[in-house]
Image: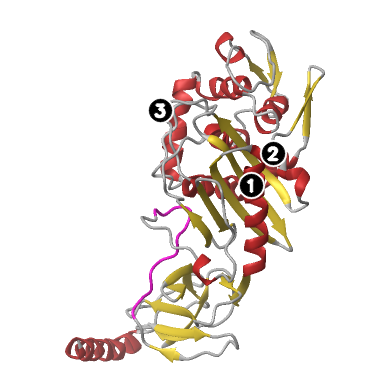
Amino acid sequence: MSSYDIGNEMIFNRVWPKLALCVIASTLYAENVMSLESYSRFKPAIISESAIVIDADTGAVLFDKNSQKKMPPASLTKMMTMYIASEAYTSNVFNFDTDIAVSPYAANMDGSKMFISNNQTIKGHDAVQGIIVSSGNDVAVAMAEFISGTSDNFTKLMNSKSEQLGMFDTHFSNPTGLHTDDMLSTAYDLALLSRSLIQDFPDLYDWYKQKSFTYNDIKQSNRNRLLYMTPDADGIKTGFTSQAGYCLASSTLRDGRRLIIVTLNAPNEKARYDDHLKLINYAYREFDNIELFGEDEVLEQTRVWFGQETMLAVSPKQPIVATIPKSATQQVRVDLVVNPKLTAPIEKNQPVGTMTVSLDQIPLTSSQIVAKDNVELGGWLTRQKEQAKYWAHQLTQYYLK
């Protein structure tokens, strides 16, 4: 196990520490969200009851306010409706020309509407725009019924998908977000969902920045007013009920860096957008993404047993990028753990260990470490010699413990 300390001047020092914690990732559950905001010079005052900012690429938490408090999600629920609809689209369950039937139950939904009629059919592309842009409860139910037969069956699918995405503090009771007492989520979980929606369906994400949608001669503007307030914003979803307050999941892209921001229960619409504008400026001002290691960069030469070669170069599975506070004076710690009992044969790109990057015990990112080359199995005589060396090495390690 090796470690490097990366200071502001990118100086490397080799030591032998214990393995650091794993990064908060979209598939993991964090009992306590570890945020980098303590390193920021200026923290925004946020009015919303709950808020979180994450870097979409690294998963780093840049701001946290009650992000694991369970609260009503309102129409942010429709992000999960669209996640499942996007899966159905990419699996050819429907396409943009597919006719989707509208039941009386769907047509008579309360709240925001696309204004579809009982027993008509709508095209797939209109249904998608109606959910994203118009936030139509009627069309959300029509899509749910098309995919799963009934709204209840679709809701079961939503909850199953929540667990798969690591949203362990979320329970959905319908595909619309209309309030029920048992429908709850957290800003943290909804940020994970937002990130997955963008990363898993990049070809469909352009829909979320569409500013208006016209259906049956009724033009509706996108309810996400942040799209009009900053050129960086390109999604995602608003929500409001009297119980949930004013909610927003937004995403911004500036100079190649994507942020995801979720706020819940702002007291009014102005406060909702003021919070997001403050958090956008804060996150881009206070943090940078830095590539620490390239994909093919050799991290270490490690011992291989019983092979034609005795040493193996290892490298990251992908470029290692971390979100670093601009004001941080602490050194970034990179812990490299390679399997000490690697035996031939080994194939190029075979996983052989892990790398974890942390800042003052706060996890930043992690990656698999892979073999940079093949190592073929040695001949009979080589293997006999290696066997004696291997057992001698094992005995030495045992007595050093």
Q: CA distance from mark 2 to mark 1?
A: 8 Å
Q: Are marks 3 and 1 in contact (CB under 8 Å)?
A: no
73 above or below 150?
below
Q: Amino acid at mark 2?
A: Asn
Local packing at callout 3 (Cα closer than 10 Å; few below 14, some 14-19, many 20+) is: few
Which residue is identified by label 3? 181
Identified at 45% across, 21% down, the residue is: 152
Where are the magenta residues, as a range?
18-29
Which residue is identified by label 2? 224
Quadrant of the image for the C terminus? bottom left
Q: CA distance from mark 3 to mark 1?
A: 25 Å
Q: Are marks 2 and 1 in contact (CB under 8 Å)?
A: yes
Q: Nearer the viewer, mark 3 or mark 1?
A: 3
Which sits in the foreground, 204 or 242?
A: 242
Local packing at callout 1 (Cα closer than 10 Å; few below 14, some 14-19, many 20+) is: many
Dominant secondary structure (helix, strand or loop) of the stretch shown in magenta: loop
What is the x, y in percent for residue 57? 59, 60
* N-term-proximal mark, 2 vs 3: 3
Q: Amino acid at mark 1?
A: Ser
Q: Amino acid at mark 3?
A: Asp
Q: How many marks?
A: 3
11 above or below 328?
below
Left or right: residue 391 compared with residue 111: left
What is the x, y in percent for residue 324? 57, 72
Which residue is identified by label 1? 250
- Label 2, secondary structure: give it: loop
Q: Determine the residue located farthest toward the right in the rendered image.
A: 217
Left or right: residue 340 compared with residue 372: left
Quadrant of the image for the N terminus? bottom left
Can residue 158 be seen in this snapshot? Answer: yes
- Label 1, secondary structure: give it: strand
